[in-house]
Amino acid sequence: MKHSHTGFWTGFFLVLAALAVSPFVLPEFWRRFVTEILIWGLFAMSSDLLIGYTGMVSFGHAAFLGLGMYGTAAALLTVRPANLWLAIAYGLVAAGVVSIFVAYFATRLRDIYFAITTLVFAQIFYVIIFTWTDVTGGENGLTFTQPPLSIPGLVNERFTPTTFHWFVLGIVTLSYLVLRRITQSPFGMVLQSIRENEPRTRAIGYAVERYKIVAVVLSGLFAGLAGVLYALQNRFAAPDFVFFTVSGDVVIYNIMGGMGTLVGPIAGAAFFYLLRELFSRFFTEVYLIPVGIIFILMIIFMPQGLLGFLKRPLNR
Amino acid sequence: VTFDILVIQLVNGIVSGMILALVASGLTLIFGIMDVVNFAHGELYMLGAYVGVLTLASTGSFWTALLVSCVTVAIIGAVLQILTLRPLLGRDPLTTILATFGLSLVLQNYALWQFGPVPRKIQEPITGHFQFFYLQYPWYRIAIGVLSGAIIGALWLFMKYGKYGIWIRATTQDRVMAEAMGIPVPWVHTGVFAIGAAMAAASGVLFGPLVGVNATMGLDVILRAFIVVVVGGMGNLGGSVAAAIFISLLEAFASIWVSPAQAVIASFVVLILTLLVRPTGLFVPTPK
């Protein structure tokens, strides 16, 4: 391909630079806000791999996020001394195992059946986590202390808000690049071909089910990573984050930001939280009334989302 | 486990199965005719219960409340369908699931805003108990089971013999041909959504006395209704009724040994097994 990538990489580094210096210029509240949006953005990107690229709407992504959180909690509560990388590994393993389980069953179905099945699976894990109080802490969840940032031979110190922001930024950027590489790989092309025309993809000779299973597991792993980061930031794991409203939120980020772009869902998460900040002032805890109405209006009048118009340049 | 616990759970299971069937048959009707998975169905059920609470408070009659609630929620449903789903006609069915999800968020938070977080109570219209050998059982539960069955039966008769019921079935079978025969398909869609909404409202009012009315009551129901609709076969009315009773019985018996919160897992397992063995639904004839 003879397309120029200069524009894309210029934009990429500009945004990256802006996010990297943001802790120095933003006040405390907004710095934390940006860090959280990066985490939710990673969660939204993971779901975009399914919604935007494979054409499968998952309404159960909270399960993967939640298992990432609880995996982190397990590592930090049971293994001494607390190790950051072990926490990430535990979180990824937990999310990975669950996503293999869900993928095996859910990918047998298509469209809305897939959506409902993922939703029901997520609720199974919610019920288990909510009622298995001895292990998961039940309704109260688990709290733990943040592990230090340790890179052997380099650093070993406690996170400050700024270094944690950079740590999250690094992981999210890396995940973005990996996901972008995945969607542009031959594997990603097959996923997009499943989205466009599944029977034809099957007829060409691709084992569609296997591709779907791998797509769900990859998506689950990145969702789990987002869960790990969220748990590390807030030092707790709670059943609320496995509840299906969280799965619904991530679908909203995708629709608002523009699915099938990877960057769009991050923008969607940012847009959602900005709207929430704005409307919480007038509507307090029922900010979802105006946000929901905006969401419905966007589905009807702006199905491509905020960044949908960049779909072609972003996927080149 | 004694014998009377088993009997009580059997009757409980059938009664709550009938209520669940009432919710699920509206859901499956809407799905069958317009390929819309109505995420907001639980919220229509919740709104129905709230309208019931308000009407009961002002009129004092449970049966008036039931009727007013059905009509009001049917109108609300029709308006919502015209505003949000009609523009999406012909788009990917997945967009409708997102739109109804948006609706459910708005309605749920609206109810929270309007009525507050404290659950409301609907007074049972029939308070008596009856004696079955040495067991006590409230008449009201029997009444809601029978009433739900009657509503579903009426729907079935209407679909089978009524003029508009035939319109609905024709639209389900072939949307384009139905339109060519002069059936106003968009209005059939609106009508079906209104009927489904009214059925959800009826179950909300009927079930209100047993569970208490709050803004999130729809969440508990919608998930089980989804399971019922998938297990019964999407768009299949009879299958939904059978699946609803089956799943409610299973949960009723499971809750003898585990807490009701965990008993839900039994129905999840049924769903998984259904998807593995027979993804088109347990209660539908084998496709030839």
Image (cartoon, coloured by chain):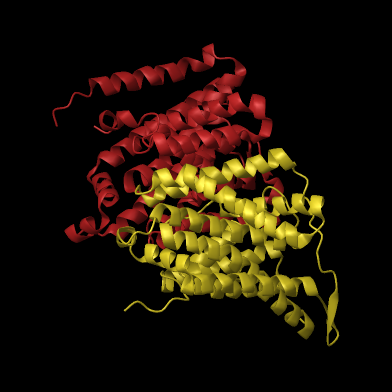
Chain colours: A red, B yellow
Q: What residue is shown at x 46% (from left), y 65% (from top)?
A: B164
Residue A263, image quadrant? top left
Q: What residue is shown at x 66% (from left), y 39% (from top)?
A: A144
Q: What residue is shown at x 43% (from left), y 46% (from top)?
A: B86
Q: Is A205 or B242 nearer to us in this picture? A: B242
* x then y, percent, for residue A63: 53, 50
Residue B63, image quadrant? bottom right
* Residue at the left extreme, as displayed: A2
Q: Is A191 left or right of B100, judged from the image as shown?
A: left
| Total number of numbered discs in the rendering | 0
With respect to residue B188, does A290 lie above or below?
A: above
With respect to residue A160, does B154 lie above or below?
A: below
Q: Quarter of the image for the N terminus of chain B: give it.
A: bottom right
* x then y, percent, for residue B283: 47, 76
* x then y, percent, for residue B112: 69, 41
From where the camera sits, is residue B288 visible? yes
Q: Is B32 or B257 nearer to us in this picture? A: B32
* x then y, percent, for residue B152: 58, 71
Q: What residue is shown at x 49% (from left), y 56% (from top)?
A: B191
Q: Is B203 left or right of A99, judged from the image as shown?
A: right
Q: Quarter of the image for the C terminus of chain B: give it.
A: bottom left
Q: Is B261 left or right of A37, judged from the image as shown?
A: right
Q: Is B77 left or right of B186, judged from the image as shown?
A: right
